[in-house]
Amino acid sequence: MAKLLIVDDEKIALKNLRHIMKKEGYEVIATQSGSAALRLLEEQEFDVVLTDLRMEKVDGMQVLRRCRELHPDTEVIMITAYATIDSGIQAMKQGAYYYIAKPFKLDEVRKVVREALEKIKLKKENRQLREYIEGLKGKVNIISQDAKMRRLLETAKQIAPTDCSVVLSGESGTGKELFARYIHAFSKRAGGPFLAVNCGAFTEELLSNELFGHEKGAFTGATAMKKGLMEMASGGTLFLDEITEMSPAMQVKLLRVIQEKEVMRVGATETISVDVRFIAATNREIKEAIKSGRFREDLFFRLNVVSMHIPPLSERRDDIPLLSYYALKKYSAIMQKNVTEIAPDVMNILMNYDFPGNVRELENIMERGVALAGGNRIEVSHLPEELKELGIRTFRKKEGAIPSLEEQEMAYIHWVLKEVGGNKSAAAQILGIDRVSLWRKLKKYGLEEDVAPRD
């Protein structure tokens, strides 16, 4: 329940405001004295303060300044019968959220209070996210509040000490390598090396050289002995990414290493014992690769002691804000910029985007946003063009349900009005309707006060 403090030396105005706000479901404390308001602010914290500007002894500006000192997150709404441009500007400069002139409309007050509480909620969520992210510094951790991911992490912790081989599947960019590092970090091998290789990035000859190494003079250009990754990873973990891209000949060699626990460098005559834990990953359907003959079934069974499927970001949308702020903080530090916020419109677009590139794509979007941001907030203008278009053409509900035609129309009209700064004539022209039709639609959808009118 939101907690409000109302300060007004006019008894009737105070009584009316208190009654209205209580009916809205808020916890309300009311006082006719600015001095009493200062004492209340010393004793307790409020979400919103509604204060009259002109009062004897202690006026609204003094209440505003003290509130900003004691409770920076509290929003202050100024109300006065002596509204002037100068007093309004002064109040806003001192940190007031809004400035309402008497006599005020009750709906206006309700709306302003609701919006102030939304801002407070957003600020608190942002701070909690930043504090959570701060606590992850220096740790191998996977950031998620999704139930599926939390279960996967529990499984990863349980199997980490067992030394069994693991196959990780999932779309590109879901964080399979990070999962592999997570397993390594909780294993008995955590003090040993963690090495990774992308099996699809090399030809068969180059991959063989990377994995097994070579002796001096083994081939033209082999001027010195080179240890392979399997030898270097002994005592630790070797992560084989895109395992289904490995050639059949290399699959045979890998199977032998897993079975015999020994490797032979290219050009060598003797084997070398290795103690390696294997974690493999693929973004393809591995069983289809087995059916088509592209992947050995016996190798799959050797590797697939435990299999884990990492869900795409589109299936764990609750993680999008958390990951967004993590990336925001990361790239702000790297670029030495003070970008700390993500505009609500930007977050709405991100929450409705399907992220074909998953977490990696989200990180790229945040990196771009931080690079382009001139202030402390990422705005829609800082997003890639395809995402800006998504904000125009996509209006999905948070639950993922397909919106009705009316919901689409309402969202589009609202967007057009915001784009033209509330100019109804311009909006009607863009929408291809006359002003009377637009007025009827605004009234129908309750959008009259959502955009400042300007013709």
Image: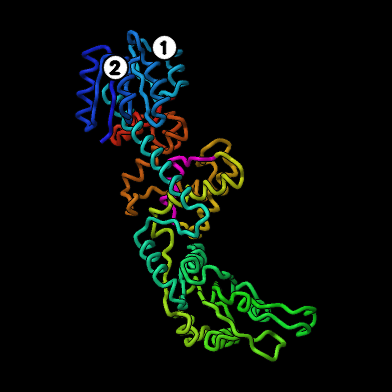
432 is within the stretch colored magenta: no
Sequence-first disc among 1 and 2: 2
- Pointer 1: residues within 10 angstroms few (<14), some, or many (20+)? few
Residue, x 52% and y 77% (percent of image)?
278
351 is within the stretch colored magenta: yes
SS class of the residue under badge 2? helix
Quarter of the picture holding the C terminus: top left
Residue, x 35% and y 31% (percent of image)?
116
SS class of the residue under badge 1? loop
Question: Does residue 267 lie above or below 210 as drawn?
Answer: below
Quarter of the picture holding the N terminus: top left
Q: Position of residue 47 (x, y in %)?
A: 33, 31
Distance from Cα at disc 1 to Cα at disc 2: 26 Å
Residue, x 58% and y 79% (percent of image)?
246
**Residue ID for mark 1:** 84
Residue 453 in sight in this render: no
Residue, far bottom: 269
Q: Nearer the viewer, mark 1 or mark 2?
A: 2
Q: Position of residue 52 (x, y in %)?
A: 32, 16
Foreground of the two, 432 or 446: 446
- Give, as a single range, the part of the protein colored magenta: 339-354
Q: Position of residue 303 (x, y in %)?
A: 48, 80
Residue 75 in sight in this render: yes
Question: Does residue 386 lie above or below 420 as drawn?
Answer: below
Question: Does residue 83 lie above or below 173 as drawn?
Answer: above
**Residue ID for mark 2:** 36
Question: Does residue 326 lie above or below 224 as drawn?
Answer: above
